[in-house]
């Protein structure tokens, strides 16, 4: 999926919502456990209930890898079920020496049809460039994350700037706004204006809204650009909104609330529509 196609989806749906399919088999409704593949059945119903309200789905691979072969089978069924119109994210946080990163890229861009993959920048350019070689695929680089441990390294001062700022400035030259995004945690709202000044045209993947307490209004006000330029991920707040047989309807209700709020912010803060 190229940038124009992604922006077109945002424009058509008046939404920049990404639904996180971080599906924990111990948290899904019990009546689904009788299915041959409970995780896929749960994901299928969530997708059917939310696909007209969101533009993206993010699959955190840890929730699938931890279940061995059964988990990978659930992941494969899920990614193949998501409509081609939706931007898909493998939240895998890969990154290694060049030949290893090339295999990770092949995994998520060839073996599985993801549009993007999250990548850790710690090992530098040669660990990231193999992901950027794919046409109409995206690398989503960790920039400033939501977790408490972000202060351990990301906010450290180095050569007159914080480490995360150096990562953004340096890595923005490895790709372009057409194939490189950055992860910026929603709980780091005070930094969004600074980050947007450093990388004015790139898309941000913004986790941390909902269960983690990030403010959708503040993020939208500070981070939007003319193409909206943000994908806001909500996982637990949507997929675990309900716990009974109507869980998908409950998920849809929450997703619709996000979409309606986003439509208002698009009108207020962006020139996309």
Image: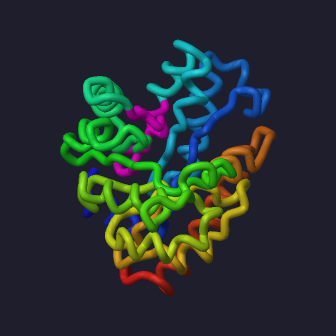
Say if residue 96 shows up in the picture: yes
Q: Is residue 136 left or right of residue 151?
A: left
Closer-to-camera residue (6/248): 6
Is residue 256 shown in magenta? no
Residue 185 coordinates in the image, percent (x, y): 57, 58
- Residue situated furthest bottom in the rendering: 268
The answer to whether 158 is drawn above or below residue 119 in the figure is below
- Residue situated furthest front in the rendering: 159
Taking the spot 32% from the left edge, 66% from the top edge, the residue there is: 8
The answer to whether 180 is drawn above or below residue 260 in the figure is above
The answer to whether 76 is drawn above or below residue 55 in the figure is above
Taking the spot 79% from the left edge, 28% from the top edge, the residue there is: 30
Taking the spot 42% from the left edge, 41% from the top edge, the residue there is: 122
Q: Is residue 75 left or right of residue 135?
A: right
Residue 78 coordinates in the image, percent (x, y): 49, 32
Question: Which quadrant does the C terminus fall into?
Answer: bottom left
The answer to whether 215 is drawn above or below residue 234 in the figure is below
Residue 236 coordinates in the image, percent (x, y): 69, 47
Which stretch appears magenta?
78-95
Quadrant of the image occupied by residue 203: bottom left
Say if residue 52 shows up in the picture: no
Closer-to-camera residue (135/95): 95
Closer-to-camera residue (143/152): 152
Q: How is the image coloured?
A: rainbow
Q: Is residue 47 left or right of residue 81?
A: right
Taking the spot 47% from the left edge, 58% from the top edge, the residue there is: 164
Residue 114 coordinates in the image, percent (x, y): 36, 38
């Amino acid at each position: 999926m190229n940038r124009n196609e992604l922006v077109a989806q945002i424009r058509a749906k008046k939404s920049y919502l990404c639904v996180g399919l971080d599906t924990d088999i111990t948290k899904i409704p019990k009546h689904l456990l009788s299915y041959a593949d409970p995780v896929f059945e749960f994901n299928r119903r969530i997708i059917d209930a939310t696909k007209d309200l969101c533009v993206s789905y993010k699959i955190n691979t840890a929730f699938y890898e931890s279940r061995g072969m059964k988990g990978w089978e659930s992941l494969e069924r899920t990614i193949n079920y998501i409509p081609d119109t939706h931007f898909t994210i493998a939240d895998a946080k890969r990154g290694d020496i060049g030949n290893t990163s090339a295999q990770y890229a092949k995994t998520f861009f060839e073996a599985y049809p993801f549009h993007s993959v999250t990548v850790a920048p710690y090992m530098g350019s040669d660990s990231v460039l193999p992901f950027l070689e794919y046409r109409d695929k995206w690398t989503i680089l960790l920039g400033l994350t939501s977790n408490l441990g972000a202060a351990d390294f990301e906010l450290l001062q180095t050569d007159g700037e914080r480490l995360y700022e150096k990562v953004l400035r340096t890595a923005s030259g490895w790709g372009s706004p057409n194939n490189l995004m950055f992860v910026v945690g929603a709980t780091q709202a005070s930094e969004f204006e600074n980050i947007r000044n450093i990388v004015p045209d790139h898309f941000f993947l913004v986790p941390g809204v909902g269960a983690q307490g990030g403010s959708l209004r503040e993020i939208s006000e500070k981070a939007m650009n003319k193409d909206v330029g943000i994908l806001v991920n909500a996982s637990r707040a949507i997929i675990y909104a309900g716990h009974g047989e109507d869980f998908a309807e409950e998920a849809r209700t929450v997703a619709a609330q996000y979409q309606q709020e986003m439509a208002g912010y698009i009108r207020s803060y962006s020139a996309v529509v």
